[in-house]
Image (cartoon, rainbow, N blue to C red):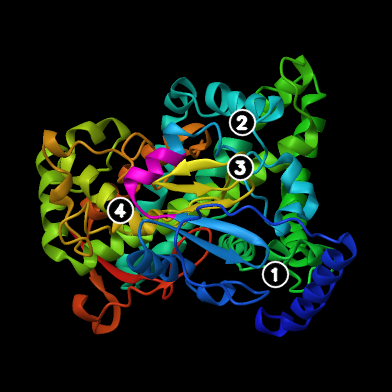
Amino acid sequence: MDFLNCIIYLCFAWITFQALHFFAGRSKAIPTIRLPPGPKPFPLIGNLFELGDKPHLSLTKLSQRYGPIISLQLGQLTTVVISSPTLAKEILRNHDHVFSNRTIPDAIHACKHSEYGLAWLPVSARWRNLRTIFNLQLLSPKVLNANHTNRRVKVQKLIDDVNESMRAGEAIDIGRAAFTTTLNLMSQTVFSVDLADQSSEMAGEFKKTVWSIVEEIAKPNLADYFPLLGKVDPQGIRRRLTFYFQKTILIFDRMIQQRLESRKGNSYVTTNDMLDTLLNIIEDKKEDINMPQIQHLILDLFTAGTDTSSATLEWAMAELLRNPEVLSKAQAELEQVIGKGKLVEETDNAQLPYLKAIIKENFRLHPTAPLLLPRKAEADVEIGGYIVPKGAQVLINAWAIGRDPNTWDNPNLFKPERFLGLENEIDFMGRNFELIPFGGGRRICPGLPLAKRMLPSMLGSLINCFDWKLEDGVVPETMNMKEKFGLTLQMAQPLRAVPKKS
């Protein structure tokens, strides 16, 4: 059942809501709160129809009309949207302790993911424990350095696969190739096996499942705006997400059980991968973690890590092909620093300022999660001269911030040079609120250290080892740069490009 067809449930919710108010006999005046400005809500549904099918664009247009902080009434859910770096800093740094928890989408209750998923857990002893495991035992600099060779092998495999396509004169689906590389990198890091390769259908099937997960989570859901409807799941979002979660967890659970069996043998040699690390933690009882938490932690790693990295690389390649002068500058830098046709090592990144600037500029225009993940106000807080009321959902529009004309000159222009020079030392580590593709504060994305290493190596190697042209006579001026909204921002039309000998 789609969003519009659920209007009958809205009527039911309205009748019930009115009845509750009537029988409760509420007669006291409701105190007025100085909410941020916004469009006038309709009865019952509020501003639901303001969202459209691309909420990041709709909310950007509303912020241009009403200001950098606006409020919307989405059914029964008061939502405040932030669209400026100054106010994002207020939320993510100055009042981070008030906004550290999430409003939990109804869909996230599928398979009890809200009780196990690191991204959705409230700040608590369990959350701190999982975050510590991430930071110190899974993605610490020491662990990432130790796994450098594994990542290099996967990038080399990507280049080898592109070489085969080049010899055959075939175009490359950039997003799919990047997804396969990232999936195998992640599966090697976690399980010491490849879950997919270019010749199998596994990568395509897994990509569909991952995209289905992020798409379902991102869909406007009446159960979020009218909690009473959560029991009936009117659009079937939680039901479908349960299927996708179970499908993915089943794959992981088989691999976990195989590892547990092999660990029983005296001849077992530890692999020192993430799974061994997590199982050792359970056995040693050094940290409070159990098997469902491991399953959901791995689910988060794969769904967040594979989709975001492949989408980011696809957007970056699209921008380079649309701006051939930028591509030429990047290739010239690579040739001068490391030599033409070579892989870009992770240690090369510091010597490649223009490549780094390209990645920053790509994050500015195409943030990984355009609205980040929702925050929840735990108390009334004054932000930008207005009150964000307790219980309100807070969305930070990273897409709008990246294109704010008050912050960026020619904001819609792909211009990496804006990040060159000491005066432009802006990073995406959560310290500069003009550029926050990974969020900020204590809830900043824990996968950032891995992404920071992977993306320059993959993108740099692709453009240093090959020249590229668009498929079927497409020219830069006619490229399809339309977006498909989800928790991650995808290209509506997959990018296909033909590799040529560099």
Q: Which residue is mark 4?
A: 364
Do we see residue 272 in this rendering? no
Q: Nearer the viewer, residue 113 or 207?
A: 113
Q: Residues within 10 Å of mark 2 (few under 14, many from 20)?
A: many
Q: Mark 3 belongs to which amino acid?
A: Ala
Q: Earlier in the sequence, mark 2 or mark 3?
A: 3
Residue 409's image quarter?
A: bottom left
Do we see residue 345 in this rendering? yes
Q: Earlier in the sequence, mark 1 or mark 2?
A: 1
Q: Mark 1 belongs to which amino acid?
A: Leu
Real-space CA distance between mark 1 and mark 3, rounded to the nearest whole angstrom: 22 Å
Real-space CA distance between mark 1 and mark 4, rounded to the nearest whole angstrom: 31 Å
The kind of secondary structure element at disc 3 is loop
Real-space CA distance between mark 3 and mark 4, rounded to the nearest whole angstrom: 22 Å
Magenta stretch bounds: 82-91
Residue 220's image quarter?
A: bottom right
The kind of secondary structure element at disc 4 is helix
Find residue 69 and report its horizontal and vertical position in percent.
41, 55
Q: Mark 4 belongs to which amino acid?
A: Arg
Real-space CA distance between mark 1 and mark 2, rounded to the nearest whole angstrom: 38 Å
Q: Earlier in the sequence, mark 1 or mark 4?
A: 1
Tell me if 353 is positioned left or right of 188 in this view. Answer: left
Residue 274: give its label: 2
Above-or-below relation of 329 to 422: below
Q: Which residue is mark 1?
A: 222
Real-space CA distance between mark 2 and mark 3, rounded to the nearest whole angstrom: 18 Å
Q: Which residue is mark 3?
A: 119
- Please check the rendered image and state whether residue 89 is part of the magenta-colored stretch, yes or no: yes
Q: Residues within 10 Å of mark 1 (few under 14, many from 20)?
A: many
Q: Residues within 10 Å of mark 4 (few under 14, many from 20)?
A: many
